[in-house]
Image (cartoon, rainbow, N blue to C red):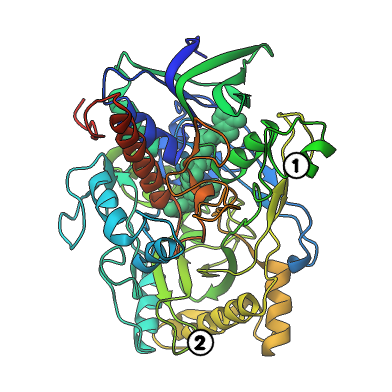
Amino acid sequence: MSQASDLADYVIVGAGSAGCVVANHLSADPAIRVTLLEAGNRDSSPWIHIPVGYFHTMHNPDFDWCYETEPDPGLNGRSLHWPRGKVLGGSSSLNGLLYVRGQREDYDRWAQMGNEGWSWREVGPLFEELETFQRGEGEGRGTHGPLQVSDPRLRRRICELWIEAAKANGIPYNPDYNGPVQDGVGHFQLTVNKGRRCSSAAAFLKPIRHRQNLDVVTNAQVRRVVIEDGHATGVEIRRPDGSHQVIRAAREVILCAGAIGSPQILMLSGVGDAEHLRDHGIAVAQDAPEVGRNLQDHLQARLVFKCREATLNDEVRSLMNKARIGLEYALFRTGPMSMAASLVFGFLRTRPGLATPDIQFHIQPWSADSPGEGVHPFSAFTQSVCQLRPESRGTITLRSADPLVAPLIEPNYLATQTDRDTLVAGIEIARKFARTEPLKSAISEEFRPTADVQGYDEVLAWARMNSTTIYHPTGTCRMGADERAVVDPRLRVRGIRGLRVADCSIMPEIVSGNTNAPAMMIGAKLARMVLDDRRAEGGAGPRAGIDKAA
Ligand SMILES: Cc1cc2nc3c(=O)[nH]c(=O)nc-3n(C[C@H](O)[C@H](O)[C@H](O)COP(=O)(O)OP(=O)(O)OC[C@H]3O[C@@H](n4cnc5c(N)ncnc54)[C@H](O)[C@@H]3O)c2cc1C
């Protein structure tokens, strides 16, 4: 860890998807001193930068917080692994690389809930500014941002057959689900640049590390925000040798520690449900009962089909093949090592009358007992389906007042009838596609679930026993215009001056898609608001700009 200087204007906690964007934008003004604190290490491991490296980094405590949920009643009492990045770049350094903005209607709904400034009209341009879409075309797509977004370098026949089967069922091919219309099937876009992962750290931090006014400190776990008379004045960090240091923020502390880290830090700092805090012996700075509530996640059902033809399971079986794959990647940055978590998407509706898609498909030319484990020893592929806007709400609470102890995570999956109905309907659509040509002829057997699992109750029972997270926890520091919301629409923590939150935890409702790009947008939005407020207060400086070339 580099030695942290004791004072900055803005102290940012967490160098993840959102935090790196915030650090980039605020430190663009040389007059603003920024300290970015990250509990994890530098992102120097080659596994982070090789796209398929997530198989190595996920569940590995060198990079991953390795959270476990509590036994979940909706999943027949099963606990799930919840990986979260603990390294520069945060979860964007070990995620599945899929670039998805969500539906425009998601943001319009946030605005309709009273969150002024968050409509698609207002946040769409931020997505555009952040990215360079390497295809270089498309309505609302950016061409000058630091985040490189590319089309996949890998295609596999089984996934193409899936697209054809979906089309045979009347689903249109959509060449750009990040454009005006999300509906349809097609190929995922990736946060990959020339065959290498483009994490938030690679895009927004690496090019600006020379800035004298930016201090990036790794191996610095924040224990709590220091709050004096209702004002956040700094943070206390734990250094690797176990000693503690206070870093003071002359202007603001900005929590970007993610949907688990941010509510945990707030509670440890005395901001949370007063009774819960007192139970843990924590002095209450602000009674904020909703901290840690409103937890939402996407639950995926992973259907596996055995195939008559070779899939990626076969390609990686022999040592010789592995060597060939390694060589291809080393020489050309192509082949299976350049692969994102899924190749093909589907955004579909389970019933008529829905204004927008309510389920998402992730199609993978391989299969495994669970993601991150070895592939099956037979030819097979996976159709993963998840509900996009679950109604179920879970919680994050403290297990202990010790910052080194992981909080209690209770996702409360499948708690409502709509959620159960939507997942079952999604599974049935996946099976219908599998029984449609040209995919049907490539499939030898329905493996998970087996073909004899029939009818609503049996399918739901299978889903409860087999579904897992698709790694999108959100909502635990809910943004809102109402008094109970944790942060207001300018992301200021209610009741505490000088403290904001900017990461996936602020989402009032989960977006209809993967959450990395929205987290980056939230970081950009926060920076803009901070700089606007600064200017209004007289602490002028240029408007937030993205330093790409530096
Ligand atoms: C395995 C996996 C696969 C995924 N696949 C995709 C995908 O393909 N596409 C997609 O769009 N999304 C995907 N996601 C989700 C997406 O990556 C996350 O939603 C997003 O990165 C979250 O951004 P964030 O800024 O909210 O938090 P994070 O990126 O998780 O950043 C939080 C940061 O804060 C740090 N931190 C936490 N607590 C402290 C503390 N006390 N002190 C100091 N630092 C702290 C963490 O170490 C971390 O670096 C995936 C996630 C995972 C885990």
Looking at the picture, how far across and down is residue 419, in whole percent?
62, 75
Quarter of the image containing the C terminus?
top left
As helix, strand or loop, the secondary structure at mark 2 comes to: helix
Query: Going by the image, does 117 lie left or right of 354?
Result: left
Would you name the residue on which mark 1 appears?
Answer: 274
The image shows residue 105 at horizontal and vertical percentages of 37, 68
Residue shown at 31%/67% (left/top)? 177
Q: Earlier in the sequence, mark 2 or mark 1?
A: 1
> Residue 36: x percent and y percent?
45, 24
Secondary structure of residue under mark 1: helix
Against 149, is 246 above or below? above
Residue 294 lies in what quarter of the image?
bottom right
Q: Please state which amino acid type lies under the numbered disc 2.
A: Lys
Which residue type carries mark 1?
Ala
Task: List the residue tagged with mark 2.
Answer: 432
| Image position, residue 447 (x, y; %) | 63, 75
Residue at x-position 78% and y-position 65%: 73
Q: Residues within 10 Å of mark 2 (few under 14, many from 20)?
A: some
Q: Residue at x 42, y 44 (%)?
A: 490
